[in-house]
Amino acid sequence: MPADRPAPNLPERTMAGIRALIRDQGLVPGDALPSETALAQHLGVSRSVTREAMRGLATLRILEIGKSRRARVAMPDASSLSVVLDHATHAKGLSIQQMLDVRRTLELRTVSLAALRRTDAEAAELLDLTSRMFKALEGDYSALMELDLRFHSVIAKASGNDLYAMLIDSFQVITRKTWAIGWRSRGTHANRLENLKCHERIATAIMAQDATRAEAAMSEHFDSAVNVLLRAGVT
């Protein structure tokens, strides 16, 4: 094998080595890693392989790479998971309904936990979001969509489990592709208003810290979403 070509899977093994170093040294988001040269020496690979591995970790939001400073541990977010979910719908032939089924399972749990663990500020924000959704009903649906996405994101955050929050936020890439279809399929003002009232029922149940009522309202919300998309031919 030519000397200038890395061995198979060497960048992947180097990525694993960098992640192990982060764990072993107890580095947290914002902490700087050793220099590229020091990393290469520590891992026993070339600087070019180290650089390639670091770029891969930056794509996964494990590292932040700046032009004039050393790489730092990144604060994880849902962006890399979103890419995987979006790709999975095509590469593995997953249907939108299958994705909704998974999301429904997650959101029934998060809404129940949110009702039990939410802060006063989170409960107030959910009620404020529903109020703004009612006001946006006659306007551009894109503004309403953003409020809807934020609504579900706040519920996931209020669950008190950061992993739930990341997973729910990662589904936004799918929701953005289907939201307008569902909204148009609701057709009448009355049907659209009822959809918003369902959000209000979820928010008020969380405010009342009634987990059973919150879960029932979320289940109703997903039943409606699934049926609307099916009527629109989205399977």
Image (cartoon, helix red, strand yellow):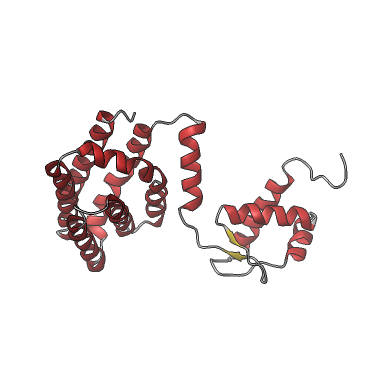
In-image side of 121 versus 79 (left or right): left
Q: Quadrant of the N terminus?
A: top right
Q: Quadrant of the C terminus?
A: top left
Residue appearing at x 48%, y 33% in the figure: 90
Residue appearing at x 66%, y 56% in the figure: 54
Residue 215 at x, y percent in the picture: 21, 46
Residue appearing at x 21%, y 42% in the figure: 221
Given the current orientation, which residue lies at the most extreme left position?
190
Residue 167 at x, y percent in the picture: 40, 49
Given the current orientation, which residue lies at the most extreme right position?
2
Residue 214 at x, y percent in the picture: 19, 50
Nearer-the-camera pick, 79 or 45: 79
In-image side of 174 versus 91 (left or right): left
In-image side of 127 versus 62 (left or right): left
Residue appearing at x 27%, y 45% in the figure: 108
On screen, 105 above or below 53? above
On screen, 225 above or below 137? above
Given the current orientation, which residue lies at the most extreme front position?
139
Q: In which quadrant of the rendered view does residue 42 lie?
A: bottom right
On screen, 78 above or below 33? above
Q: How many marks?
A: 0
Q: In which quadrant of the rendered view does residue 120 lie?
A: bottom left
Residue 187 at x, y percent in the picture: 19, 38
